[in-house]
Image (cartoon, helix red, strand yellow):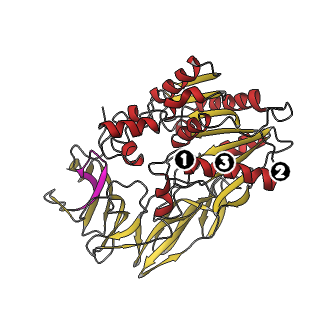
Amino acid sequence: FRTRKKLSIIVPEVKDLVKGDFDVVDIATNGNRFVFCATIEDDDTGLQDIYDLNISSGKYKRITTGKGTATSVAVADDGAVAYIGHRDGKKPWAAAKLMFPEMSKGIEIAKSASSSVGSDLFIGPAESLVYDKGSFYMIGQDGGSSALYGYLKKATKLTGEKINIRSFDIKDGKLAYVYTSPAKPSVVVFGKELDLNPATKGIVPKEMKVNGQDAWLMPARGKAKGTVVCVHGGPHTAYGYTYSIEFNFLANNSYNVLFGNPRGSSGYGEKFAAQCVGDWGGKDFKDILDFMDAAVARHKVEENFAITGGSYGGYMTNAAIVQTTRFKAAIAERCVSNLMSMCGTSDIGFWFNAIESGVNDPWSESGMRTLLEMSPVTKAKNATTPTLFIHGEEDYRCPIEQSEQMFSALKLNGTETVLARYPGDSHEHARHGVPRNMLDRLQRKLEWLDQHMAGAARSGRSKKK
């Protein structure tokens, strides 16, 4: 059973204004004009439009054209409507813009008028659009950073470098926001800064440019047991200047943490984001290997690596172990292993895997062949790396059968493997999971790394392949 999001008003009793077999995503008003975003026209794919709403009659009229996304909307004092999104159709790698539907124009804000820089903090980046005193305000992403922008005839950056904005609001010209940085989980700014976690100080990673791409190495405290390569999800998200609970946990337990933004990541323009489409585990994986080579050459880390990631990062972990024996251990979380079986079984929609794989029809013979060729499970006999799978049993984004398939394939072929199942956890198990499961997950990951990496380089198992 799926709970749909509707729009209601209290006058004084609750009255439903807009409801149906679709989701209302956002609403805005200037007191005279009411508009909302919803998936009415194309709910099967989850694309959104903007609608003008007559509060008295409950009737509404679509004011966007074409197909695309519309995640946040705002109304100016003069009635002008703006939203965050695009009109590029089913295109997960498209950069969001500040859109004015009744003027048929879109304004570029940084590399994207939203932020998908990831973190395991308990709040995600805000996708808000706010109008105040003549200007529209939103978050813009540039590489691994995000900032607040104001727009009045042109976009103006309002906050500093190498941080990420997590939430904001503005009223009567008074701006308040929350940011994170590698050193601090959450800092509130309202005239002055208030550090909500004064006793917490994160390890600041070393920045690297590798073939022009951003990567970072967080050094271990004390003598390093090895280096854990972390791969973000998406694929069209990014790592960057945020505090990471897990990265600091690993570094404080004597592991270097290497992370970066391979081709396909967000925040570097649409062309860069599109480079992994139809090539998951190809150029993007080559970039990850290049990050590793750079860490060895520049920072003298030992050739003793593990790989981990969730969602698309879990896919990449699976793709890595069927392509190389370079990793001493692997941990695939909420992973993808079979792109074919995931079509039609994931809440991300029947089309996402197909379009990301460069396939028009996933049920055609050629489409099935492409999806299976890109699926790590079909090459599982190549894998010899000890691999831990972690999955929430209520994950509807990457159903647990994705881990079950890869785990079974490794197990039946004699590769050391364990599948840890967490009852009650969803795809967000690492960020919003059952608290005892979240603690157990970190400890389980550490134990797996200690079991397979501690002393691996000293024992002679450190040849690169």
Which three-letter amino acid code belongs to the residue tagged 3?
Answer: Leu
Three-letter residue code for mark 2: Lys
The residue under the point 41% across, 60% down is 94
In this view, the residue in front, 322 or 366, is: 366
Does residue 126 show up? Answer: no
- Compare marks 1 and 2 and give the one earlier in the sequence: 1
Is residue 372 within the magenta segment? no
* Neighbours of disc 1 within 10 Å: few (<14), some (14-19), many (20+): some
Q: Is residue 234 above or below residue 324?
A: below
Q: From the top left corner, tell me how far across and down residue 428 is, in percent.
A: 50, 39
Q: Which residue is labeled 1 in the image? A: 282
Q: What residue do we see at 55% from left, 28% from top?
A: 380
Residue linked to disc 2: 300
Q: Left or right: where does residue 183 sit relative to residue 371?
A: right
Query: Between marks 1 and 3, how big is the CA–CA gap?
Result: 11 Å
Q: Residue at x 63, y 38 (%)?
A: 308
Examine the residues drawn in magenta and state their main secondary structure.
strand
Q: Tell me how far mark 2 sits from mark 3, CA to CA.
A: 15 Å
Who is closer to the viewer here, 341 or 346? 341
Q: Which mark is residue 161?
A: none
Disc number placed over residue 289 in the picture, else none: 3
Magenta span covers which residues? 37-51
Which quadrant of the rendered structure holds the C terminus? top right
